[in-house]
Amino acid sequence: MRPNHIYHVFPLGALRNTADGVNSNASTNHAAYRNIREFASLIPHLQSLRVDSILLGPVFKSETHGYDVTDMYHLDSRLGNDDDLKIMVRDFHNAGLHVFFDAVWNHSSRHHFAYRDLREKGPNSSYADWYRNPRFNTPNLCGDSFTVDCWAGFQELPAFNLRNPDVERELIHNAEYWMDEFGIDGIRIDAAEDMDLEFLRHLATACHRKRPNFWMMGEVVFGDPRRWLEAGLNSVTNYQTYKSCWSSLNDGNMFELAYNLNQLFDDKSGTCKGARLQLFNENHDTNRIYSQLKNKQDNFVQHLLFYTLPGVPTIYYGEEFGLDATKGGCDDWNLRPSLDLAKFANQTPAGQENLLSEIRHLASVRLDCDALREGGFQQEFVHSQQFAFWRTHQNGDALVLINQQDAPVQFEIDLRKHLTHAQQVSTLKNLRDLLSNEYIKIKNSKITVLIPPKWGRILVPSGI
């Protein structure tokens, strides 16, 4: 199973009932929530976006935000019960959509059964080696008489010892339980970059043995994606391209993006050529892309790039309406708002009214074009505010032209530099723009093409 377009929601934010849709200071334990089955109401919207998969942020029992898991086997009671989750998954499957869960297996809450036992019995606990590097003579900042390694310095998130065979068996059993009990199609592995690679290799082997098409994506912020792909994961989060895309637009420096894409995806030398890394513009931990961009009209160019670059595009709920929010404070709940599509639409910023329709159009163009959906990558040219690249595929290549300037720009492109078969070039009469359906005449194996301001073209061969 290969996802082609994912919609990402954060359930403990999206299903929260608040007066204004965002309740950044209130404890999530004291908020009212809607049932997880209500996500089924999203299906028509997702179908209009040509989405084929939904990625749920953490849904299992936790103390607060979902990543401090207390019980990996049961839905968080704030969102309903296990049967509600099964019904939700069934509804999405009946609509032809895949469902992915967020797997929090690097660490747990201090109220997880293994850590509770460790707190009660200390070094005499059967789980004394379930957490990394226990120091029984060193109290931690949470009031425990001992200290273990934890995620990112947060001592309320003790890290599992993934080299312990018992821990490995428990977590693999948990994955298999989700597959059997809830029928999910894949997982996002939280904090994969902090996890033991040998454990991930065993996990991937077990999951793919049980279901060869089970999709596994690791959250990796820093590091060479190849390490996790070689461990058996199908994809990793592509933070390098995420950053270089908006940064190039903000700085008027397409060379940064070009360098990143050539390094990762070039057909000849790319370190991840052929891989389908996760593309994203924003998620539950980042600024909204509309907020991130200095020139708000670049949001259209941003999404044109997003739907033409190599990878698996993942749109974060509300992004299609240009929601405005930045990281700040200690909780980030403003990045994880209560989900209300009508309200989101009413909050669409001035100048972004066509964003939703453009995203729908771009998603359709991508999914209907083999080269954009799963092709390779070759750079044609790069300037400070223009970028041209080919997406290569055995069924036909696509030439993407991007113009960030406020004015149209004209280029002459010699197709023989890319289309090396002279007969192929000589028989072509036109290229067709998938965005405008305009035909660009080929003359002497060259095209002269005008790129619209703050927009672009996607050109494919046409026999007409």
Image: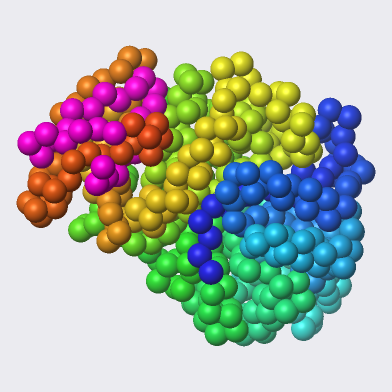
Image height of 221 relative to 74, above or below = above
The quarter in which the C terminus is drawn is top left
Decide if residue 78 is on the left or right side of residue 58. Answer: right
Query: In front here: 206 or 191?
Result: 206
Query: In front here: 456 or 301?
Result: 456
Q: Is residue 155 visible?
A: no
Image height of 50 relative to 210, above or below = above
Q: How is the image coloured?
A: rainbow
Q: Over which residues does the magenta segment extend?
A: 439-464
Task: Give the x, y percent position of residue 376.
Answer: 30, 55
Decide if residue 340 is on the left or right side of residue 268. Answer: right
Query: In front here: 311 or 41?
Result: 41
Residue at position x 58%, y 80% from top? 211
Task: Give the x, y percent position of residue 86.
Answer: 81, 67
Magenta stretch holds residue 328:
no
Give the residue at the far front of this rendering: 464
Task: Give the x, y percent position of residue 45.
Answer: 69, 44
Magenta stretch holds residue 450:
yes
Image height of 436 relative to 275, above or below = above
